[in-house]
Image (cartoon, helix red, strand yellow):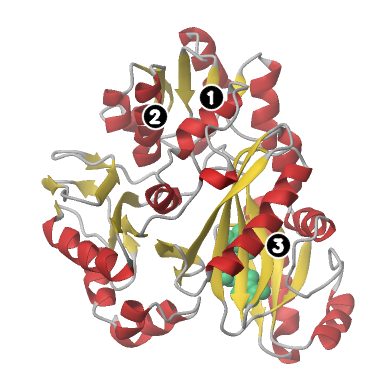
Amino acid sequence: MFDKILIANRGEIALRVIRACREMGIKSVAVHSTADADAMHVRMADEAVCIGPPAGTDSYLRIPNIIAACEVTGAQAIHPGYGFLSENAAFVQAVQDHGITFIGPTAEDIRTMGDKITAKDTMKKLGVPCVPGSDGGVPDYETAQKVCEEIGYPVIIKATAGGGGRGMKLAESAADLETAFRTARSEGKSNFGNDEVYIEKYLGKPRHIEVQVFGDGKGNAVHLGERDCSLQRRHQKVFEEAPGPSISQELRDQIGKTCADAVANINYAGAGTIEFLYEDGEFFFIEMNTRLQVEHPVTESIYGVDLVREQIRVAAGLPMSFTQDDLEINGHSIEVRINAERLPNFAPCPGKVTQFHAPGGLGVRMDSALYEGYSIPPYYDSLIGKLIVHGRNRDEALARLHRALGELIIDGVETTLPLFDALLAEPDIQSGDYTIHWLEKWLETNLQ
Ligand code: ADP
C-alpha cells in the first residue's frame, strides 16, 4: 500500500480523499493555488505545496507543477478527484512516465471514453444500448440533413469532445438544424479544441439514470446500482438520489450486469459511471465518466462502501474488498448540491462566509470545505457543499433532508439553498415523478 498520496484537487473532494487516506493510515499531500492558501484542504492534509497563481490553468491544471509537487514530497500516487485533470489522458501518461501511480483507469480508457463518438462506438460493441443517431461523426451540414431525415426530429447535435453540458444544441425541426449544427461545432472548437459533432435523437421525457461500476483492472468488475440525476439545470445535476425511484430490482440487475460485463471486458480499473437516458422502460447510453462523480456519496450511503478507499486499493494492486454478491441496497439516499450562487439567475456569488453551521444527526452527511471566516474565491466552480441524507426508505430520506436543510446555516454569501426547500414542497418531487426537463420548466414558472 502507498505511504503517501497527493490530491490534485481542491474543495470538498480534496477533503473526501484526505479522509479516506487518513482512515487507511496513508499520509496526504494537498496542492493549492495562491488563492487557496487558507483553504480547508490545505489545513487538513499532512503536507501542502503551492503550485501556482489563482487561475486553474496556472495551478490545478498545470501538469508539471503537480508532478514536481509529487517528487518534492515523495508522494507515490495521485488522486485526481473530479474535474480539473481527472479525465485528462495526457496527465495520466505524464504521471506514469514519472513512475507515479495514477489512481484511476488507464490513459487509453480515459481517451476512449473522453471522446463521445469513440465511447458510444465502444459501448455499442460491448452490448450496451445507445441513443439512436448518426453512425459516428457528421462532417457537414448536408450529411446532417440526411441523418436527421432518417432519425426524425427533434434531434440533439453534440460535440464529441463536449462535457459539463456544453457543446450540445437542440434542433426541434429542420428549420433549426443549420444553426444548431454550426453552433455545436463552434462551441466544440472554442471550448474543447475539437469541432467534430454527432447527432442523436432528442428524447422528450427521459430520466437520467447512471450506473456506478467498479473494476479491478484485471477483468473483474461489479456494479453498485444506479443513481437518478434527472433534476438538472442547463444539463447540470442539482439533486441526485439512489436507488432510482423508477427502477425495479429486476431492471437494476439487468442493466447493472450489462455495464459490469462491459467494463470487465476492457479490464477497466477503478470507479466509473455509465450514463443513460431512460424512457418508456428502455435505457440509452449517453456517456461514460472515468472518475469518481460528485454524486458518489448517495451510492456509498445505500451500499455502505467507501468508493475512494476502493479506488486506492485497486490502484495499489489489491483486489476490491467486495464482490457483487456482497452488495445489497440498504434504504434510500439523496444529495443536494449547494452552490454559492444568487437566485433566480444562478449568478456566482463568491465572498466571505460569516457563519457556517453544518447539520448533523442520524443519516446526515455534509461534504463541504467551508468554515466560518473562509473567503470563497471567485476563480473556481461555485459548488461549496453537498448535503447527503440517508433513510430507511425514500420518504424518510426526504423528511431527513427537510430537517437537515433547516439546521444548515451559511451566511455571508448567497446560495442555492432556498431552491431545495421549495423543491421538497412539490408533489412531483415527493412522489419521485420527474424527468430531465422537470426542473427547467419548474424554474421558469417558480423562480422569476
Ligand atoms: P455532458 O458530457 O455535457 O454532461 P451528456 O451527453 O452526459 O453531456 O448529457 C448531459 C445531459 O443532457 C443529459 O443528462 C440529458 O439531460 C441531456 N441530453 C443528452 N443527450 C440527450 C438526448 N439524446 N435527448 C435528450 N436529452 C439529452
Q: Is residue 438 left or right of residue 317?
A: left
Q: Tell me the SS state at disc 2.
A: helix
Ligand 1 image-quadrant field = bottom right
In the depicted view, which residue is nearer to us: 363 or 109? 363
Q: Amino acid at mark 3?
A: Ala
Distance between the alpha carbons at the discs numbered 1 and 3: 29 Å
Distance between the alpha carbons at the discs numbered 2 and 3: 36 Å
Q: Is residue 126 left or right of residue 360?
A: right
Tell me which residue sits at (53%, 71%) in the image. Answer: 248
Depicted 266 relative to depicted 333: above or below: above
**Which residue in the protein does label 2 denote?**
20
Tell me which residue sits at (24%, 52%) in the image. Answer: 363
Distance between the alpha carbons at the discs numbered 1 and 2: 13 Å
Q: Amino acid at mark 2?
A: Ala
**Which residue in the protein does label 1 denote?**
78
| Quadrant in the picture for the C terminus | bottom left
Q: Tell me the SS state at disc 3.
A: strand
Q: Is residue 175 left or right of residue 233?
A: right
Q: Position of residue 123 (x, y in %)?
A: 77, 57
Instruction: Answer yes or no: is residue 166 visible.
Output: no
In the depicted view, which residue is nearer to us: 75 or 216? 216
Q: Is label 1 in contact with label 3 (beta carbons under 8 Å)?
A: no
Tell me which residue sits at (64%, 79%) in the image. Answer: 170
Q: Amino acid at mark 1?
A: Ile
